[in-house]
């Protein structure tokens, strides 16, 4: 049901990975029962909630596009890792699940040094605005956490899926600690393995970047970090005034150690759609 929201049919091994079943054999028994009752459908090797073969073609095309574009994500990841105060770079979003299309972005999940999140974010946003003309196509940096706040606060199907499919690119030690602090994802996915971080690249900063980090390792750096937080928060409160306080706190979280820029509040939309689909299926199977 979760992946059907994205029109993404799954193979049997994937369904097992994203379930709490004890074995693939047990998974097949459940699926066969649902197939016989007309609750789900099977086309070729794929299982679907809708009898739509076009979803399979869409997925296969998206899988190939993801393979073709991944080299770009690798290059951008390396580039981002060079920025001041960046200590971890991961690929998230649809690309982390092996899917990409013409309307997609390359989403990055970023870990920063303590008390320097808003400085790190400002450097990256300035680069995007000045040199990429504010394009986020291959440079979507919309989720930052500080190395002192690695545990994801919202714990639900959406965030668990994002964490378990995250692809760590740079910052091996940071992601080791990140996964250690987010073991709660096992409550949602007992079979799905997190990414192998043994080959995650170490971050190597150019001398000029190291110089900037040393230069701002003082009260002035603290002042700038707080200033950029305050300015960004005021701008977002004005720009996204259509969001009520509850949704704003989740979608546009702006604290000393967390920055999220999700004005569409995609997390809430997905969870609401999942709950609706769940209710529909319950009614269907009576």
Image (spheres, rainbow, N blue to C red):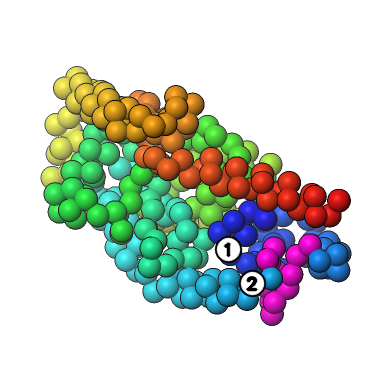
Depth-wise, is mark 2 or mark 1 nearer the camera? Answer: 2
- Asked whether residue 71 appears in the rendered view, the answer is yes
Q: Measure how far apart labels 2 and 1 are at the Cα level.
A: 9 Å
Asked whether 32 or 218 is in front, the reply is: 32
Query: Residue 7: which disc?
Result: 1
Q: Position of residue 197 (x, y in %)?
A: 49, 54
Mark 2: few, some, or many residues within 10 Å (few <14, many ≥20)?
A: some
Residue 189 on image: x %, y %: 67, 49
Q: Is residue 27 left or right of residue 244?
A: right
Which numbered disc flags the more N-terminal residue, 2 or 1? 1
Image-quadrant location for residue 211: top left
| Residue visible at 63% across and 54% down in the picture | 2
Who's the residue at 48% across and 45% down the image?
266
- 71 with respect to 83 (left or right): right
Task: Say whether residue 195 is magenta.
Answer: no
User: Which stretch is magenta?
Assistant: 39-50
* Residue 277 appears left or right of 248: right
Q: Is residue 186 visible?
A: no
Question: Can residue 48 be found in the magenta stretch?
Answer: yes
- The answer to whether 125 is drawn above or below residue 56 in the figure is above
Q: What residue is at 37 percent from the left and 58 percent from the top? A: 105
- Looking at the image, which residue sits at the far bottom? 44
Q: Left or right? Give the position of 265 relative to 189.
A: left
Check disc 1 and report its element: helix, strand or loop. loop
Q: Secondary structure at mark 2?
A: loop
Q: Quadrant of residue 87?
A: top left
Q: Which residue is mark 2?
A: 52
Residue 217: give its label. none
Which quadrant is home to the N terminus? bottom right
Cβ atoms under marks 2 and 1 closer than 8 Å: yes
Q: Nearer the viewer, residue 61 or 107?
A: 61
């Amino acid at each position: 049901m979760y992946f059907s929201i994205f029109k993404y049919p799954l193979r049997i091994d994937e369904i097992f990975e994203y379930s709490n079943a004890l074995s693939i054999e047990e998974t097949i028994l459940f699926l066969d029962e649902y197939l016989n009752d007309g609750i789900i459908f099977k086309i070729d090797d794929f299982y679907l909630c809708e009898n739509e073969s076009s979803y399979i073609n869409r997925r296969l095309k998206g899988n190939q596009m993801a393979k073709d574009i991944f080299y770009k994500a690798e290059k951008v990841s390396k580039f981002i890792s060079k920025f001041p105060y960046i200590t971890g770079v991961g690929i998230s979003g649809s690309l982390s699940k092996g899917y990409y299309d013409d309307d997609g972005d390359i989403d990055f999940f970023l870990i920063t040094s303590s008390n320097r999140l808003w400085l790190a974010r400002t450097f990256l946003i300035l680069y995007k605005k000045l040199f990429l003309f504010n394009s986020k196509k291959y440079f979507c940096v919309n989720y930052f956490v500080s190395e002192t706040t690695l545990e994801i606060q919202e714990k639900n199907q959406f965030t668990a899926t994002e964490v378990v499919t995250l692809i760590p690119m740079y910052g091996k030690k940071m992601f080791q600690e990140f996964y250690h602090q987010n073991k709660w994802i096992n409550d949602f996915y007992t079979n799905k393995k997190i990414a192998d971080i043994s080959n995650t690249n170490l971050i190597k900063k150019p001398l000029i970047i190291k110089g900037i980090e040393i230069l701002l390792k003082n009260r002035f750096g603290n002042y700038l970090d707080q200033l950029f937080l305050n300015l960004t928060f005021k701008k977002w409160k004005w720009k996204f005034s259509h969001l009520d306080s509850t949704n704003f706190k989740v979608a546009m979280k702006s604290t000393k150690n967390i920055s999220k820029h999700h004005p569409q509040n995609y997390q809430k939309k997905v969870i609401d759609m999942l709950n609706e689909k769940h209710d529909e299926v319950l009614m269907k199977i009576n």
